[in-house]
Image (cartoon, helix red, strand yellow):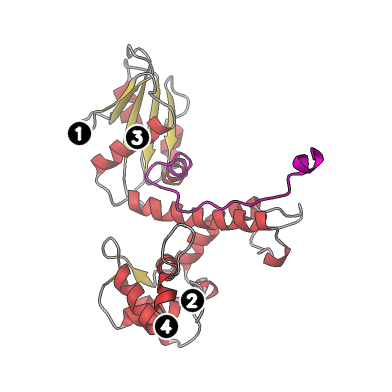
Amino acid sequence: MAIPDYQSLMKPVLEVLADSDVLSMRDLTERISQQLNLTDDERRETITSGMSLIANRVHWSVTYLFKARAVNRPQRGHVQITRRGADLLATGGEIRNSTLEQFPEYREFYDKYRNRKVRNRVAEPTTTPNVEVDEEDESPDDLIARAEADARAVLAADLLEKLRTIHPTEFERLVLKLLGAMGYGGLGGHLHTGQSNDKGLDGIITEDKLGLDRIYVQAKRYGDGNSVTPEQIRAFLGAMMGKGDRGVFLTASTFTKGAREAATGVPARVVLIDGEELVELMIDHGVGVEPVRVATLHRINEDFFDAL
């Protein structure tokens, strides 16, 4: 049999999890494979990156179910069904992305990136947001661009959740690695100064070998709903006073309106980077992420034929 698409696997995934407590992704994939009666050849079928096709589709099924809070990830690489997932399964109906649209958490995740996905498509100027483009009208280039946008949206959301689980000290080291990957400190160095009494500074980037040109860094991991306040911005500015006039304040959360106002109209130049911008920068500069698949399209080389 052909291995079902990831949306068709949503219901089987919930059915398997409903009969279990917590399953590793490997065990979940194995049970799904048994339920589908996959042959050895089908189990060995892979995608371009080398990952098992069935494992890849179970992964995406779990990812979207997680965004709808139909499943939970109690620990790394493990998954369990939630009350919402059990209720969804009890309806007996088909479960697909369109089904998950009923949940506000899923809509918030998807709507956050929907406009960006539409902008990435080749469409007429009259195309409006939230109107899906018929795949039959899209060129192969458009389909790949749309798939990349979808995958990036999921990656960005997962990456932000990951950042909010790491230790604050690890977060401080991460942002220094990111700034280094962006080219800051290439001629100087990166000093991690963060500790329990860091007086508002978590890192110093020297832009030259003598350390005359410096950028000061403050990193606040924080979780969703715990925003950076004006007082913390002013503490950062105070820590920079007399040392330099350039600073970067990064957080995995957000800045209040007052915090952003506190960073303007001051002698120092301070850049504020919130969680959403932070993960986009990480993806752009390959920090904490790795490529798993490269798609190459070919076209006729007209110059080759003209030269014959």
Residue 141 drawn at (x, y percent): 66, 54
| Marks 1, 4: nearer the viewer | 4
The label number, if any, that marks residue 237 in the structure image: none
Q: Look at the numbered disc 4 and give the secondary structure of its residue.
A: loop
Q: Which residues are magenta?
A: 280-308
Q: Amino acid at mark 2?
A: Ile
Q: On screen, 143 above or below 259?
A: below
The label number, if any, that marks residue 36 in the structure image: 4
Q: CA distance from mark 3 to mark 4?
A: 44 Å
The label number, if any, that marks residue 177 in the structure image: 3
Q: Look at the numbered disc 2 and give the secondary structure of its residue.
A: loop
Residue found farthest to the left: 196
Residue 212 drawn at (x, y percent): 35, 12
Find out whether residue 147 is within the magenta segment: no
Q: Which residue is mark 2?
A: 3
Is residue 86 visible to us here?
Answer: no
Viewer-proximal residue among 40 and 236: 40
| Marks 3, 4: nearer the viewer | 4
Q: Look at the numbered disc 3 and give the secondary structure of its residue.
A: helix
